[in-house]
């Protein structure tokens, strides 16, 4: 199964592709590491974001999008732009998008700790949360 994990931070969607094949994980090479929206009030930018992600899903044969859950209230609450991006991901045609809760993620990572570093798999530091989300989801 090939998934695209998404970590939404402010106006950015940091992504990580992860493939599970017979219990082994592989991080496939990907042309994009993040998508950014500069003007949240622009419907055109939201449409463009949705179109870019749809093309990525098609080109890399992604089977599911997994979105890291963010709180709606409090100090660490997600931004309005982030929730617009989340909605755009959930409304993509032909692919299921699931919000993965923090509690499920913590439980999965506790049962199956990650044994590799980001550098070993060729990812950047800003992709860490997306990578952890992907690993936790595939190990649940």
Image (cartoon, rainbow, N blue to C red):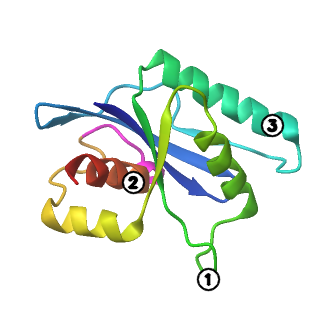
Q: Crowding near pointer 2: few (<14 within 10 Å), some, many (20+)?
A: some
- Kindly report the distance in space between the C-alpha atoms of the residues bearing marks 1 and 2: 21 Å
* Image position, residue 138 (x, y; %): 25, 46
* Image position, residue 55 (x, y; %): 59, 20
Q: Crowding near pointer 3: few (<14 within 10 Å), some, many (20+)?
A: some
Q: Is residue 51 above or below residue 42?
A: above
Farthest bottom residue in view: 74
Residue holding disc 1: 75
Residue holding disc 2: 128
Q: Is residue 4 above or below residue 11?
A: above
Residue depicted at x 62% and y 50%? 86
Boundaries of the magenta span: 121-127
Is residue 135 on the magenta stretch? no
Are the residues tagged 1 and 3 within 8 Å (C-beta)?
A: no
In the foreground, 124 or 129: 129
In the foreground, 137 or 120: 137
Apparent side of residue 126 relative to residue 44 in the rendered image (left or right): left
Residue depicted at x 58% and y 76%? 76
Is residue 123 on the magenta stretch? yes
Disc 2 element: helix
Quarter of image, res 49: top right
- Decide which of tag 1 and tag 3 comes sooner along the chain: 3
Quarter of image, res 35: top right
Residue holding disc 3: 45
* Image position, residue 22 (x, y; %): 11, 31
Q: Can you tell which of label 2 and label 3 is closer to the viewer?
A: 3
Q: Can you tell which of label 1 and label 2 is closer to the viewer?
A: 1
- Kindly report the distance in space between the C-alpha atoms of the residues bearing marks 2 and 3: 25 Å
Q: Is residue 39 above or below residue 93?
A: below
Quarter of image, res 106: bottom left
Where's the N terminus, which quadrant?
A: top left
- Decide which of tag 1 and tag 2 comes sooner along the chain: 1
């Amino acid at each position: 199964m090939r998934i695209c994990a998404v970590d939404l931070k402010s106006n950015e969607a940091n992504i990580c592709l992860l493939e599970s094949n017979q219990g082994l994980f592989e991080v496939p090479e990907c042309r994009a590491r993040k998508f950014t929206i500069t003007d949240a009030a622009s419907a055109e930018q939201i449409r463009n974001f949705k179109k870019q992600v749809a093309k990525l899903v098609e080109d890399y044969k992604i089977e599911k999008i997994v979105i890291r859950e963010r709180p709606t209230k409090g100090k660490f609450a997600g931004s309005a732009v982030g929730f617009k991006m989340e909605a755009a991901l959930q409304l993509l045609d032909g692919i299921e998008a699931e919000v993965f809760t923090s509690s499920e993620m913590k439980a999965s990572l506790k049962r199956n700790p990650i044994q590799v570093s980001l550098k070993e798999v060729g990812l950047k530091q800003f992709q860490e949360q997306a990578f952890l989300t992907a690993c936790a989801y595939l190990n649940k």
